[in-house]
Image (cartoon, rainbow, N blue to C red):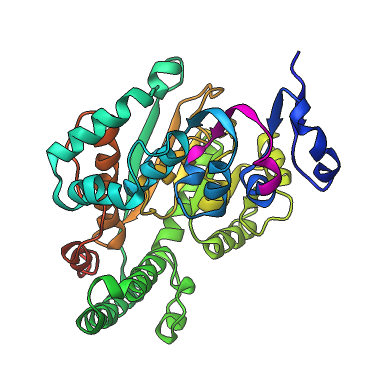
Amino acid sequence: SLSVAVHHGAERHDRRAALGSHDVIVTTYPMVARDRDDLATVPLHVVVLDEAHAIKNCNAQASEAVRRLDARHRLCLTGTPIENHLGELWSLFDFLNPGLLGSKEEFTLQFRGPIEERSDRVRLQALRDRVRPFILRRTKDAVAPELPRKTQLVQPIELSGKQRELYESIRVAAHADVRRHIRERGFAGSAIAVLDALLKLRQVCCDPRLVNCDAARDVTGSAKLETLLELLGQQIADGRRILVFSQFARMLGLISEALLERGVRHVSLTGHTPDRQKPIDAFQQGRADVFLISLKAGGAGLNLTTADTVIHYDPWWNPAAQAQATDRAHRIGQTKPVFVHDLIVVGSVEQRMRSLQRHKQMLADAILERGSATSSRLTEHELDDLLAPLA
């Protein structure tokens, strides 16, 4: 039998000297980053990174720490080797096989720039050929053909009345502000203004109460929240068990208030939840019908196969993050068909974000499969489209 050491918790300091005598050491990315100097001195035969996209940012402490581990062999396990751009793939390979893709600067010059900015097919094929011998891809259909079907549904929502007027007033002001920043600082230097503008429009779509401005205080009611509550009522009446994801913890709080008023059994998980396991157990054991989850806090690493319905309250830029959230329910162990509902405000920044999501997915598919690459970077033309009037 294997001797296993769990390197975690305050007691780990007492067991540090004995780590080298165990067959297997199990730890977390934060622990590796925190104890990087000690762990770097432990000789290892193999290092396996689960959820390896955790090191997609090559400058993050965890990424730097795992690169320092002394191992003969290295293995990355991930469903999303590319989430936003090709630099994330370089970070994984800089751990797996340092030098294979050159330095970060060389990779950007030789591959990332030509592929992302010009959709260079020659460079794309060269990158495919370079990484293919080191990638073993297994799709869910191949490894779990018995998995029940997953049905994706888009729930279109129309803004009306004061909420629509608020969206337009914020959009007009934001567009003017962004254009002023671009004139003064250039497109690349206007990132903060761009993100702030898009954030406010996304918040209006979710619920005007999220928006921090005077005009929003007079607007009551949210078309999307009303749609969600109606949908939840239907699903619960049909005996379904539901996960609701949002990027906004405050939005989950507003949903929770509405569910409390209606007597709906539910639990929540955000980055502020002190005991993560408590709501997970309550939902899995059937003491709640609805699980409200912050995408960043619970979008990965959870097994919630008692759920058979997933609702994405608001879209995220990264399609892989949303897919991972859906897979909390649609995974091995699921015995029922899973229905996924995307709540999208028609003609808004949300609908246009979905188009950008498809572009990012095409970039990942172009490297891992056959396909043509598209740019992963937001262009001025795409920004104008995101800030266009409600259709």
Q: Is residue 369 positioned above or below 207 on the image?
A: above
Q: Quadrant of residue 89?
A: top left
Residue 239 appears in the picture as rendered? no
Point 39% across, 17% down: residue: 142
Residue 48 part of the magenta-drawn span: yes
Location of residue 98 by image quarter: top left
**Left or right of 71 in this view: 135:** left
> Residue 354: x and y, percent?
28, 51
Give the residue at x 31% y 46%. 86
In the image, is residue 177 above or below residue 141? below
**Residue 339 placed where, x, y %?**
43, 35
**Can you name the residue that lies furthest to the top here?**
1
Count of all numbered marks drawn on residues in the image: 0
Residue toward you, 261 or 268? 268
Front-most of 311 and 222? Answer: 311
| Depth order, front residue of 138/262 | 138
The residue at the point 61 percent across, 44 percent down is 29
Observer-nearest of 327 and 285: 327
**Which residues fall within the magenta stretch?**
37-52
As drawn, is 277 to the left or to the right of 53?
right
Q: Give how far across and how far down residue 31 sits, in percent.
A: 68, 46
Q: Is residue 41 magenta?
A: yes
From the top left corner, tell me how far across and down residue 306 is, in percent. Answer: 59, 31
Quarter of the figure that contains the N terminus: top right
On the rendered structure, is 98 left or right of 250? left
In the image, is 196 to the left or to the right of 292? left
